[in-house]
Amino acid sequence: MSSPVPPSSSRAAFPGQGRVAVVTGASSGIGAATAERLAQEGFDVVLAARRLDRLTALAERIGGRAVQLDVTDATAVDAFAAGLDRVDVLVNNAGGAFDASPVAEADLDSWQRAFAVNVLGSVAMTRALLPALRASGAGDLVFVGSTAGLTSYEGGASYTAAKHGVHTLAETLRLELVYDPVRVVEIAPGMVKTEEFSLNRTRSQERTDAIYRGVREPLVAEDVADCIAWAVTRPHHVNVDLLVVRPRAQAAQHKVARDE
């Protein structure tokens, strides 16, 4: 895999130089932005997602390696891990919300999908790559959570329950790995405007547009990628346990300023 870092570049200028980062869900949104940003920081980036066409185009542009992967397939995850010689950073980003129904009208298929990709996919990737993160001597295990994993709201139970699972997974791992050379970082974004997240949830462009209507400068994927890159490039004794990041217009899950 080619490195995006010129041979003459200094380690100070490229803090990720010589380190390998795996990013799941890297074909779009936060995952794609994170892969690109980590490549800029000097990391050799392995991009993993189901949509290989989009993944390959991005990987070629940033000098990374594209691998088709469904994180909900534990056998495929184990095979993926076996094909990697080194891993220093794992960004568990693959996830999503797939409905906006109240619990009384729960679509169990959506609930199962939400838990499979957000929670079980993260568990499978962590289990498979943790030996390599330990072996690196300075591993970083990053979970892209959500403010939905800290606060519940109406119509969001399948997603909030899954992201609460991600939050407690990160907390538990931080306890279990305290004697290992592995940091556990959770980045919890609030309102982020990406091309697919809300559309996958509402299945309606009109309803998706309404979510962001009048909101002055919601976060974009690059804002979250910036937070991830910052966290994993701190000196390794510095652990960013939980970083909550919202647009200034969003004071809380239910409190959003909108221009009328």
Image (spheres, helix red, strand yellow):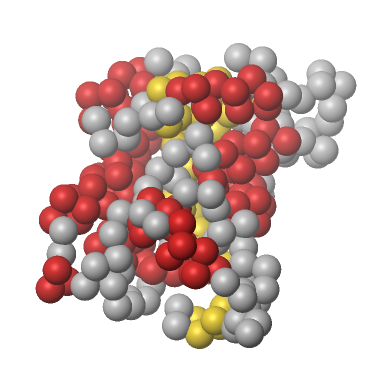
Residue 168 visible in the current orientation: no
Q: Position of residue 16 (x, y in %)?
A: 68, 35
Image quadrant containing the N terminus:
top right
Q: Residue at x 76, y 25 (%)?
A: 5
Image quadrant containing the C terminus:
bottom right
Residue 24 visible in the current orientation: yes
Q: Position of residue 7 (x, y in %)?
A: 81, 18
Q: Residue at x 43, y 65 (%)?
A: 207
73 horizontally vs 33: left or right = left
Q: Position of residue 231 (x, y in %)?
A: 61, 53
Q: Position of residue 50 (x, y in %)?
A: 38, 29
Q: Is residue 123 above or below residue 103?
A: above
Q: Residue at x 68, y 27 (%)?
A: 62
- As rendered, which of 200 and 168 lies closer to the eye? 200
Q: Is residue 45 above or below residue 197?
A: above
- As rendered, which of 5 and 151 lies closer to the eye? 151
- As rendered, which of 81 and 211 lies closer to the eye? 211
- As rendered, which of 189 and 249 lies closer to the eye? 249
Q: In the displayed image of the protein, which residue is found farthest to the front?
A: 206
Q: Residue at x 24, y 68 (%)?
A: 101
Q: In the displayed image of the protein, which residue is found farthest to the right?
A: 8
Q: Quadrant of residue 33?
A: top right
Q: Quadrant of residue 116?
A: top left
